[in-house]
Image: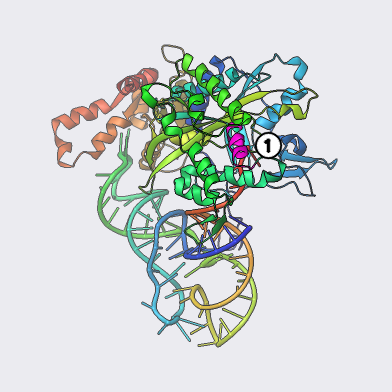
Amino acid sequence: MSSADKPAPSKLKARQPRGFVDRGPADVAATERMLAVIRESFSRYGFDPVETPFVEYTDALGKFLPDQDRPNEGVFSFQDDDEQWLSLRYDLTAPLARYVAENYDALPKPYRSYRAGYVFRNEKPGPGRFRQFMQFDADIVGSGTVAADAEICMLAADTMEALGIQRGDYVVKVNNRKVLDGVMEAIGLGGEENGGRRLTVLRAIDKLDKFGPDGVRLLLGEGRKDESGDFTKGAGLDGVQADYVMSVVEHQPGIWTTGGELGRVSDWNKQLQRNATLDEGFAELDALNAAVVAAGYGPDRIRIDPSVVRGLEYYTGPVYEVELTFPVTNEDGQVVRFGSVAGGGRYDGLVGRFRPEPVPATGFSIGVSRLYSALKAVKSPIVDAKNELPLVVVTAMDNKSPEFMPGYQAMVSELRKASDANGKPLVRADLYLGSSGFNAQMKYADRRGAICAVIQGSSEREAGTVIIKDLIMGAELAAAGRELKDSAEHKAKQAEAQFAVPVAGLVDGVKRVLARHSS
RNA sequence: GCAGCCAUAGCUCAGUUGGUUAGAGCGCUAGAUUGUGGAUCUAGAGGUCCCCCGUUCAAGCCGGGGUGGCUGUACCA
C-alpha cells in the first residue's frame, strides 16, 4: 500500500489457454439438469453407466499411433516415466472399446452402456468448437443386428424430445457406409489403390450442407476456389462419375415422401447401376427403416439420407447424425443453422482390435455443449435459470462492529436449515461479508439475483425484529417515477414489499416472499 | 497447416504529417442520502499503447521478426 512497495513490473497475466473455457454458475447448473435428462432417457432404454479415465495408452485410442516420436496429431499426448505414450481421450468410443475388451468375460452381452465426460482435441478452436468439450455416449456392444442400430436411432430421437426440442425441429438422418462404398465401386473407385480418391470424394459429399450441390460438384471434379482465393484440389471425377454420385446424395428429398407413403429404398435403388455392396447397404437401410417405422418413428423423426458421411476411419455399417433443423439468429443478427448435435454409427472393427473374436458394436455420441447452446436458443425449460433454488442475502448493517456479526450468522444458519413442505431445502442463504456500506450491500443482493434481503439495524435489534425486503417487488417500486412515489398506492405496495417480523419469524417471513413469486 | 484482416483502460473504440503528462463513452469502487437496488451529481481506481529488434533528436503511429485474436479454407476420431 505504501509507495515503497510498488507492484513488480511484470505481473503474471491471467488468461485461459486457447480453446478452453470457464463456465459460470448458470451454465454449470443448467448443464447439470440437461445431463440428468439425458441420463434418464438413456437409462430408460436399459443402458447402464460406466466411467473410464481421461487418459489411455495412446495405442488403445487407435488412430494416431506414435509412428514417430511425437504422437501429437490432434491428440494431447505425453510419455509416462516408463516411456510409454499416454494420451488424453479424444472421444468416448475408443475408451469404451478398450473397457469392453478388457472386461469381456464379466460383462453381459450384448452390453448396453452410457457415459458422459470431457474429451480433448489438440486442434484449432473456432466458434462453438473447443479443445475440451463434453460428450454423452450410448453404445450397444456385441450385437450385429440392425435392430441395435434402430434402437440407437430411436433413443436419439426420444432424447431430443425429452430435452424440450419439438418434433420437427430435429431429425435423425441415417445412411450406411456400404451404400457409399457401393457408389465408389460403381464409379470405378473400388480397391486398395483408390483409397485416397475415395476419401476425397466422401469429403466432398460431406460438404453438401456447406457449399451446396454446385460446390460439391466442383470438389468432385477439378476443385474449388474459396473467397479468400485458396484452392482446394478436387477428386478429378469425370462428368458421368460425378452425375452418379450426385444422383445418390441429392436424391434423398423424394425417397420417403413419394405418394404420401413411405417409399422403399430397394425400389429407389433400381434407378441406379447396382452391385453387391450397394444392395447390402440398401437392404440394411431398408431393415432399419422398417424397424423404426414399426415402432412409430416416421420420417419426421428418423430419415434415410444418403449424403450423411461420418467417421470415415472406423464406421462400418449404418451411420447416424442428429441435426437441428430450426433456424437461429446469432448475436450478429445472422440466421444460422445449428447443424449436427450428435452422431454415431456401427463400428464393428473397434473392439475386435483387442480380441481374438470379432465384436460388433454400434452407438452414438451427443455433443453436450453444442446441444446446450441449442437448448438455450429454443428456450427449453430445462436450461431455464428459474429452476435454481432462490437466494436470500442477509445484510450486515453494522459490519463495522464485529460484535454484531454472530447475530447475522445465526440468521443465515437458520435459513440454511429451513426446509419446505416436502422436506427439501427452502433457500440458499448468503451473509454479506464485505466492508462496504449498506447501499452497496443492496446492490450486491441485486447483482446476486437474490429474491429477498434480510435487514437488521440497531433499532430492529432493540425491537427484536428483522426486516424482510422483497427484492423483486422492490425493483418494480424502485423503477417507478419520482412523482408516483408519494401516492398512497405506492406506499401501500412499499409496505408489502418490505415488512418487519419478529426474529423468531424469520423463516416464515421469507416463505411469505417465496410464495409471491413461486409461479 | 494455408490465406486474409486485426491488436490502445474491464468492454466498445478515438488518437492529426512521428512531437511534451495517451483520451471518450459504458462499466467498476465509493460519496452525496446515520439505514434501502433505479435516476442524477461528485470523486476515485484502472494502461509495460501485445512482445522484441531496428529507423529517428523523438515511436501508440514508420520498418522487420515474433506472439495472440478473428474470418475463410484444410483436417476432424
- Please identify the dominant SS of the magenta region: helix
Identify which amino acid the numbered label 1 is placed on.
Answer: Arg
> Per the image, is A484 magenta?
no
* Residue A340 horizontal/vertical position (percent): 49, 36
Mark 1: give few (<14), some (14-19) or many (20+) Cα within 10 Å.
many
Above or below, B19 against A302 in this view is below
* Residue A31 horizontal/vertical position (percent): 50, 30
Q: Residue at x 19, y 31 (%)?
A: A491
Q: Chain of mark 1?
A: A
Above or below, A430 against A435 in this view is above
Which quadrant is home to the N terminus of chain A? bottom right
Tell me which segment is drawn in magenta. A178-189
Is residue A473 found left or right of A388 in the rendered image?
left
Which quadrant is home to the C terminus of chain A? top left
Which structural element holds mark 1?
loop
Above or below, A249 against A149 in this view is below
Q: Nearer the viewer, residue A26 or A34?
A: A34
Q: Nearer the viewer, residue A390 or A77?
A: A77
Above or below, A267 against A243 in this view is above
* Residue A110 horizontal/vertical position (percent): 67, 16
Is residue A241 found left or right of A315 in the rendered image?
left
Q: Residue at x 38, y 39 (%)?
A: A328
Outermost right residue: A82
